[in-house]
Image (cartoon, rainbow, N blue to C red):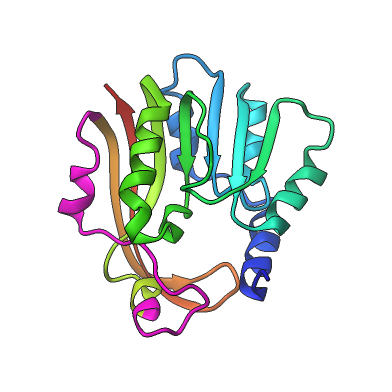
Amino acid sequence: MVSQETLDYYDATADRDVREDLVGAIELVAEKTTVIDCGCGAGRDIEFLRKAGFEVFAFDLEADAIERCQRRFSGDDKVHLVQATFSSFDYPPANLIVADASLFYCPPEEFDQVWNKIVSALVPGGVFVGSFLGPNDSMVTSANKGEIDWPVVSDFSEQALRSKFDGFEITKWTEHEVDGQKANGDDNHWHIFAVIAVKT
């Protein structure tokens, strides 16, 4: 059953402006044809991507997220929605892959397999835009202490994460480490690597 924290997150982000990195990433895509949205949540990015001209293939682990998006994009045959995990989703060839605040939840033991699927799905010249947890984030330390709903999250040092982008040209790399709040208002120490990269 979906947690109240997740439901609050969907409510808080459903109509929020898309992140600057996504806006920048689509400017790098030569042909705006197919995009995969990994962990689509309430569909904020899907709406932006449809307006930009993409056909969107989106998935989320939570049935509630898929149901919200089905209502939101009812009748749009260019939005394809599936309830799936990172490892079970069937990744079609794509010009753009978006993984904003979602790959955190890929189990560490499955991450390499999932990342290989993502890299394989991107066509040459395709763009990846997404974010990853650094080791100092509150989600990482809380997961290690068993204080949150999910038992583990995937996190990376800068060196380990950069090694994942062999075969890419990194066009933007930003490390954020600040104290702040989650979408639901809870205090959080953020340690995030935000990446835009083009597959060579």
Q: Position of residue 27 (x, y in %)?
A: 45, 24
Residue 14 visible from this viewpoint: yes
Q: Can you say which quadrant of the picture contains the N terminus?
A: bottom right
Q: Main secondary structure of the magenta part?
A: loop
Taking the spot 44% from the left edge, 72% from the top edge, the residue there is 180
Q: Quadrant of residue 136?
A: bottom left
Quadrant in the rendering for residue 59 = top right
Find out whether residue 160 is within the magenta segment: yes
Image spot of residue 96 (x, y percent):
47, 29
State left or right for residue 74 relative to residue 123. right
Q: What stretch of residues is rendered in magenta?
A: 142-168
In-image side of 188 versus 92 (left or right): left
Taking depth in this image into account, of 26 and 1 the one nearest to the observer is 1
Is residue 60 placed above or below 166 in the rendered structure? below
The spot of residue 186 in percent (x, y) is 53, 78
**Res. 192 in view:** no
Please report the residue visible at 68 percent of the width from the left and 67 percent of the height from the top: 7
Q: Residue at x 44, y 15 (%)?
A: 30
Count of marks overlaid on the render: 0
Coordinates of residue 159 in the picture (x, y in percent): 15, 52
61 w.r.t. 70: above or below: below
Vertical relation: 41 (above or below) 171 = below
**Image-quadrant location for residue 64:** bottom right
